[in-house]
Image (spheres, rainbow, N blue to C red):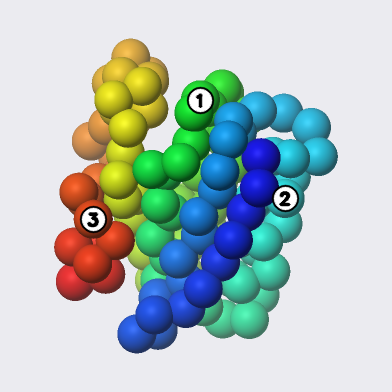
Amino acid sequence: MKLTDREENGVIILEPTGKIMGGPDASLLHDKLYEFIEQDKKKFVVDLSAVDWMNSTGLGILISGYTTLRNNNGQLKLANVTEKIKTLLVITKLDPVFESFDTIADAIQ
C-alpha cells in the first residue's frame, strides 16, 4: 500500500493505494492518521478509490480512527468507496457507521 495525504479547506484527505492488509503497510495509514490527530486535526476524508482490498486490519484502522475522532469532536468520512469495499462494509455491518460519499468534494461539504 502507498499513501498520499493533503489538506483542503481544513480537511485532511488520506489517499491509500493498493491493499490495506496487516503489516507495515497498514501501520503507515494508522500512523499517518494519528500523526494528524496529534496535530489537533479534526476532519478527515479517506479516499478509497484506489484501494483494491481491505481486510480486518484495515477495517480496524478505520474504526479506531473514527472512534478516536468522534470522541474528540472530530469526523472521519469515506469517499469513492469501491463496490468491493462497500460489500465488505455491508457484510461487517459497518456501512451505517461510516458516512460515505461519491466524491471527495461531497465528503468535504
Q: Are marks 3 and 1 in contact (CB under 8 Å)?
A: no
Q: Which mark is residue 28?
A: 2
Does dot 2 land on a helix, a strand or a loop? helix
Residue nearest the observer in this picture, 93 or 31: 31
Instruction: Name which residue type carries label 2.
Output: Leu
Where is residue 60, by image quadrant?
top right
First along the sequence among labels 3 and 2: 2
Dot 1 alpha-carbon crowd within 10 angstroms: few under 14, some 14 to 19, many 20 or more: some
Q: Is residue 7 above or below residue 99?
A: below
- Determine the residue located farthest toward the right in the rendered image: 24
Measured in 3D between alpha carbons, the distance from the residue under mark 3 to the one under mark 2, in whole angstroms, is: 23 Å
Work out whether residue 41 can be spotted: yes
State the CA–CA distance, disc 3 to disc 1: 19 Å
Q: Nearer the viewer, mark 3 or mark 2?
A: 3
Point 50% across, 55% down: residue: 15
User: Can the viewer see residue 93 in this picture?
Assistant: no
- Of labels 2 and 1, earlier in sequence is 2
Mark 3 — residue?
103
Residue 74 drawn at (x, y percent): 40, 69
> Can you give x and y, in whole percent of width and height, for residue 108 in the image?
26, 69
The numbered dot on residue 24 is: none
The residue tagged 1 is: 53
**For the view shown, which residue lies furthest in the bottom direction?**
9
Specify the amino acid type for callout 3: Thr
Q: Quadrant of the C terminus?
A: bottom left
At mark 1, the secondary structure is strand
Q: CA distance from mark 2 to mark 1?
A: 16 Å
In terms of sequence position, does the residue under pointer 3 or pointer 1 come before the other?
1
Q: Residue at x 62, y 54 (%)?
A: 3
